[in-house]
Image (tube, rainbow, N blue to C red):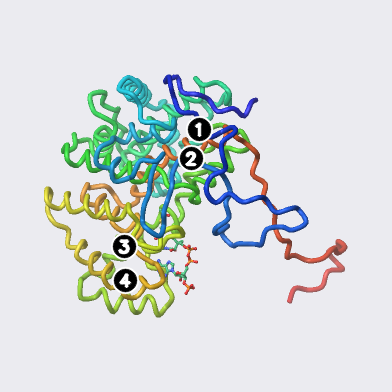
Amino acid sequence: MAAKSGASPHQNEVTPPESGAPPVRGAEPMPTPAAPAPFRPGLEGVPATQSAICDIDGQRGLLTYRGYPLEQLASNSSFLETAHLLIWGQLPTIFQLRDFEREVQMHRRVSFRIRDMMKCFPAGGHPMDALQASAASLGLFYSRRALDDPKYVFDAVVRLIAKIPTMVAAFQLIRKGQDPIQPRDDLAYSANFLYMLTEREPDPVAARIFDSCLILHAEHSLNASTFSARVTASTLTDPYAVVASAVGTLAGPLHGGANEDVLEMLEQIGSVEAVEPWLDQAIKAKKKIMGFGHREYKVKDPRAVILQGLAEDLFLRFGHDPMYEVARRMEAVAAERLGPKGIYPNVDFYSGLVYRKLGIPRDLFTPIFAIARTAGWLAHWREQLGANRIYRPTQIYTGSGERSWLPLENRPAAV
Ligand code: ACO
């Protein structure tokens, strides 16, 4: 099986920097084996790949996808157009976009076998676990692993982008004891997802805002779940396993799972007046404040800036949320207390308020993040295949020196 990047059937695509690409900013010569790199917990600051997909300027709060500022994409693009940009490196032509949209629309349905499998999941299970299992199960249906076949690659991209939302919506209805509803071909990507979730055709403004949220969450360079995706991709396994491993990584509360905790925190605080004492107490107890801090950003996350604007748009149209005032007060007080350490709101701080206003249950916030981030994971999957070398870092062994096995009767009693 070749480790070649599958090309899109779209013509004139920009080839990702898979071969002969100049080293990206920050690339350094590898240390010799005699001088191993120093251990950095969490690989902080250690380049683990070269990538042309997304750039972050964490000091100035700037984020670009393939060179396009996120603000421009969030205001003007659609999620599917942005996904195309991320995965194939350029904005699609009108024909490429129509082709991609049509293919995605045609592959939204999932097999009854997957729906039946989901009916066996415990209703009380977390939707991220349901999504991880369902995404992995796609590999049972389509796992040819023809990674050097452009059609296989294109079809895998289309299937994952198309079916992940359907599976998220299906689990939501199944766990309520209802049958999943079929996608509606007359609805665009985001409107159709909201329809499948709520069984009501969404307000066009709500659908547009939701689509912008997907754009904002679509990609963010080598974060934990994307690293997970690239490590899995580097073994040349199938793309369904790549996405399933990334979904599992995204689920953690230090990563995508923080958006659920933010709302819980705001509700626990309860009022604007309670913010300051709550925060002081939390900082004294050395608690991590959910929705704050980021490995890359030392200023307010640009996605949080845009999400805050989207939240305000939603409140104007559908009514205010008192928790927004609590959040704003929290941001102001935290700026005094944590700002000097470079800790500001991240993407998860305002996203929960947006999703709540859209009527989305709290434990679906992270699955929705996964719907969006599937685009980024697939872009990295393709890029990884284009210049693949299996990930195999080293370690610093801290265990016991060599010792001899003892029969049970000769072992000292445990202390
Ligand atoms: N609240 C309070 N203090 C914080 C926070 C926070 N949210 N984040 C970092 N700090 C402090 C740490 O206590 C530490 O202080 P110290 O040097 O005095 O000990 C310092 O800042 C560095 O913190 P680290 O945890 O080492 O920073 P790291 O880069 O490893 O962590 C992370 C980044 C995991 C996002 C962290 O900020 C955090 O846990 N935030 C809360 C969870 C969260 O919102 N996650 C979502 C991130 S965005 C995303 O994944 C989509």
Which quadrant does the C terminus fall into? bottom right
Q: Which of marks 3 and 4 is nearer the N terminus?
A: 3
Position in image of residue 20 (x %, y %): 59, 33
- Amino acid at circle 3: Glu
Q: Distance between the residues labelled 1 and 3?
A: 41 Å
Disc 1 + disc 2, Cβ < 8 Å: yes
Residue 283 visible in image: yes
User: Does dot 2 land on a helix, a strand or a loop?
Assistant: loop
Residue located at (34% from left, 54% from top):
347
Q: Is mark 2 within 8 Å of ligand 1?
A: no
- Is 298 placed above or below 280 here? above
Residue 380 position in % (x across, y down): 50, 38
Task: Tell me the residue that label 1 is attached to.
Answer: 16
315 displayed left or right of 251 = left
Q: Nearer the viewer, mark 2 or mark 4?
A: 2
Q: Can residue 260 be seen in this view?
A: no
Q: Looking at this view, name the residue that lies furthest to the front.
A: 22
Few, some or many residues within 10 Å of mark 2 (<14, 14–19, 20+): some
Q: Which of pointers 3 and 2 lies earlier in the amino acid sequence?
A: 2
The amino acid type found where label 2 is placed reads Ala
Mark 1–mark 4 distance (CA, rounded to whole Å): 40 Å
What is the spatial separation of the Cα atoms under label 3 and label 2, in whole angstroms? Answer: 37 Å
Lower sequence index among marks 1 and 2: 1
Q: Name the residue under label 4.
A: 334
Of 358 and 409, the residue lying toward us:
358
Q: Nearer the viewer, residue 168 or 112?
A: 168
Labels 2 & 4 near each other (Cβ < 8 A): no
Q: Distance between the residues labelled 3 and 4?
A: 17 Å
The vertical placement of 161 against 328, above or below, is above
> Helix or strand or loop: what does disc 1 sit on?
loop
- Which residue was labeled with disc 3? 264
Q: What element carries label 3?
A: helix
